[in-house]
Amino acid sequence: MEPTGQGGDRLLEVEAGRYVPAVPVSVSRMRSGSVDPTFHRYRETPMPRFVVEGGRPLAGAVRPAGNKNAALPAIAATLLTSQEVVLQNVPRIRDVETLLELLKSLGAAVDWRGENEVAIVAGDRIDAPPDPALAEKIRASILLAGPLLGRFRTVDLGPPGGDVIGRRRLDTHFLALEALGAVRRTAAGFSMETSGLVGTDLFLDEPSVTGTENAVMAAALARGRTVIRNAAAEPHVQDVCNLLNQMGAGIRGIGTHMLEIQGVEELHGTTFRLSADHIETGSFIGLAAVTGSEITIEDAPLAHLDSTLLGFRRLGVECSTEGTSLVVHGDRDRVIRQDAYGHVPKIDDGPWPAFPADLTSIALVTATQCRGTILIHEKMFESRMYFTDKLVGMGAQIILCDPHRAVVVGPAQLRGSVLESPDIRAGMAMLLAALAADGESEIKNIGQIERGYQHIDARLGALGARIRRVDGEG
């Protein structure tokens, strides 16, 4: 047994690759206040994981869940009224549950009325600032800023958490809310107040999705007219704007990069159904391709798939529509389409309506199972591509040129491996890689995947995938 500390300060010891209890910490450290004096022993709790048997074709139909990135701002928007707001088609995922817990910490009443329907009543006052421990768990906690400023004129929010995929600026949020009349009180966290927001003409320094959503929610109750230029226009931004209009807001230009908001004195309750998740739909397209399967995606958000289908078509993945369903012909020959004059093609992301950044990880894994060479260029986050070393370890032919660009040569025969989910999308991409690989894979830290994909093991199991969720020691 090898100690992890020195002398009486040991907290953990390693035995057969696992952490086990060690001796209590020294009395001197207890007295110093650096360790809780009630602490005596610690044992690591094994985290849930997926055990995946790959190399099996899938078949059948799957339905995308409600848009995760629409559900989160929609939940935040319920703070803008004291009346009941009912949200339908809400995915039951960890990020949603965490944000609902944050609303409860503010005094809101939350009632699940079905598997995917939740009713929220924010009431006339907030009981306390948002729980900082909960705020640190998800990036979406920042979406509380706009509604709290707009209705209660103050927000005191700890630094938001979220995926570790590179620097994620908050400056756009500050600049937008300050332009509407809010004042930052401190440099730490997100602490602002206002004597009353006033409409303005503002240009966002980048088309930030959450920055746009915060500005729109704050402007909905601001005095006068607000124009937001260089606004994000993603489907989830459209959903929250449509929800606000159903609540009595006056928003024009939805789906464009210039939004006009006429502020109103108050908003009212409503019932609103979230659109299907176009990112999850893209993940299922990749699933069909890497497993060589034909899969039907029912009730797909066809109006929001133009750039997604274009990107996968470049990889040689063909799809067709049948009514409201999308049929992915992943069992056909998948040949990457060269650019004119034989140039190496690329898939690159960008603000909507370009190829979604959240699908670059999925596209990269899909490319490993297609014939040809392609460049994947992820422009928006400088750490999102680092998971490729795990794919190389599985047998993928990938050259990571820099933090933003990777060249993929396929097809490659992947081998089962032990993997870990670094973020939601890379975690799902590695699940796809495991399903394409020969042999058994183990995926750790699956909480990252489950933050964004509802009951993914059961839903893929219904298509024939062999995925076993192992909790704790099981």
Image (cartoon, rainbow, N blue to C red):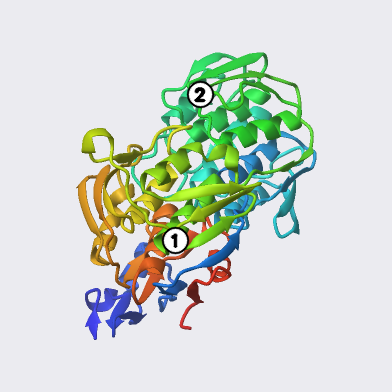
Q: Nearer the viewer, residue 256 or 223?
A: 256
Using the numbered discs, state the Cα–Cα distance from disc 2 to disc 1 in whole angstroms: 48 Å
Q: Is residue 346 left or right of residue 329?
A: left
Q: Quadrant of residue 113?
A: bottom right
Residue under pointer 2: 176
Q: Position of residue 201 (x, y in %)?
A: 54, 13
Q: Position of residue 190 (x, y in %)?
A: 49, 36
- Marks 2, 1: nearer the viewer: 1
Q: Position of residue 473 (x, y in %)?
A: 46, 82
Q: What's the residue at 21%, 49% (across, down)?
A: 400
Q: What's the residue at 59%, 37% (across, down)?
A: 303
Q: Nearer the viewer, residue 251 or 202?
A: 251
Q: In terms of secondary structure, where does tag 2 sit? A: helix
Q: Is residue 372 left or right of residue 356?
A: left
- In primary-sequence order, the first of circles 2 and 1 is 2
Q: Position of residue 277 (x, y in %)?
A: 57, 47
Please name the amino acid that badge 2 sits on: Ala
Residue under pointer 1: 331
Q: Nearer the viewer, residue 183 or 236?
A: 236
Mark 1 neighbour density, 10 Å: few (under 14) some (14–19) many (20 or more): some
Q: What's the residue at 50%, 23% (across, down)?
A: 176
Q: What's the residue at 30%, 67% (across, down)?
A: 414
Please name the amino acid that badge 1 sits on: Asp
Q: Is residue 167 left or right of residue 259?
A: left
User: Taking the image as drawn, is residue 159 in sight?
Assistant: no
User: Taking the image as drawn, is residue 227 in sight?
Assistant: yes
Give the vertical position of 458 relative to 177 (above or below).
below
